[in-house]
């Protein structure tokens, strides 16, 4: 099996068996993001656990890339300190801007390395990034993170 088809299998598995999918009753912050070019929708929620870990709730509809990306996001950041979640988020954003030439660190990105091939297709990059942009927005709205200065992604 080629690496590419292995990665496709990982993405399909997250799409078919989404991890942690579902909404919370009382989130601190919620962000609803759409990707009009593909029709993807993500409703992302955040809260904080008593020991300061990030709690994630989400629902969405759309293509396999966008929905699998939300599942991978949950798997990677659920329960992690906000600062750790932000470094993972930035590593994923960097991966998606790599045009497929990155050598992603599986220790940091886990199953998200499967998206390296997606970074070759500009139309799909927005799909993959949608849940991660919504996460940042939900964290800002929930007061878990401050507004970025000027470097908009
Ligand atoms: Zn999409």
Image (spheres, helix red, strand yellow):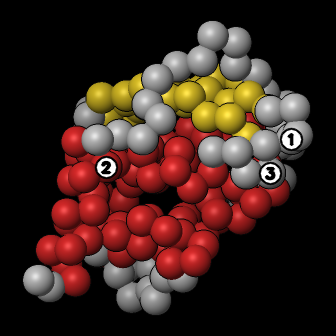
Quadrant location of the N terminus?
Answer: bottom left
Give coordinates of residue 9: x percent, y percent.
19, 63
Q: Earlier in the sequence, mark 2 or mark 3?
A: 2
- Asked whether 16 or 148 is in front, the reply is 16
96 in relation to 67, above or below: below
Q: State left or right for residue 113 relative to residue 85.
A: left
153 in relation to 100, above or below: above
Say if mark 1 contacts mark 3, CB within 8 Å: yes
Q: State left or right for residue 127 relative to residue 144.
A: left
Quadrant location of the C terminus?
Answer: bottom right
Q: Secondary structure beneath disc 1? A: loop
Give coordinates of residue 141: x percent, y percent.
76, 28
Q: Earlier in the sequence, mark 1 or mark 3?
A: 1
Asked which quadrant contains residue 46, the reply is top right
Kindly report the distance in space between the C-alpha atoms of the residues bearing marks 2 and 1.
26 Å
Instruction: Decide if residue 105 is in sight here.
Output: yes
Name which residue lies at 36% across and 74% down.
116
Kindly report the distance in space between the C-alpha atoms of the residues bearing marks 2 and 3.
23 Å
Kindly report the distance in space between the C-alpha atoms of the residues bearing marks 1 and 3.
6 Å
Give coordinates of residue 47: x percent, y percent.
74, 28
Q: Ligand 1 near label 2 (Cβ, under 8 Å)?
A: no
- Tell me the residue that label 3 is attached to: 81
- Tell me the residue that label 2 is attached to: 14
Q: Secondary structure beneath disc 2? A: helix
């Amino acid at each position: 099996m080629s690496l590419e088809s292995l990665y496709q299998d990982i993405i399909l598995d997250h799409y078919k068996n989404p991890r942690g999918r579902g909404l919370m009753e009382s989130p601190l912050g919620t962000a609803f993001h759409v990707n009009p070019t593909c029709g993807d929708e993500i409703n992302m929620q955040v809260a904080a656990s008593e020991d300061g870990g990030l709690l994630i709730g989400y629902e969405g509809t759309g293509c396999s890339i966008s929905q699998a990306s939300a599942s991978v996001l949950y798997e990677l950041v659920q329960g992690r300190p906000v600062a750790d979640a932000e470094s993972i988020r930035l590593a994923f954003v960097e991966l998606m801007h790599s045009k497929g030439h990155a050598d992603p660190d599986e220790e940091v990105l886990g199953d998200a390395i499967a998206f390296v091939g997606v970074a070759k297709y500009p139309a799909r990059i927005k799909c993959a990034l949608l849940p991660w942009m919504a996460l940042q927005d939900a964290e800002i709205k929930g007061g878990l993170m401050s507004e970025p200065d000027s470097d908009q992604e």
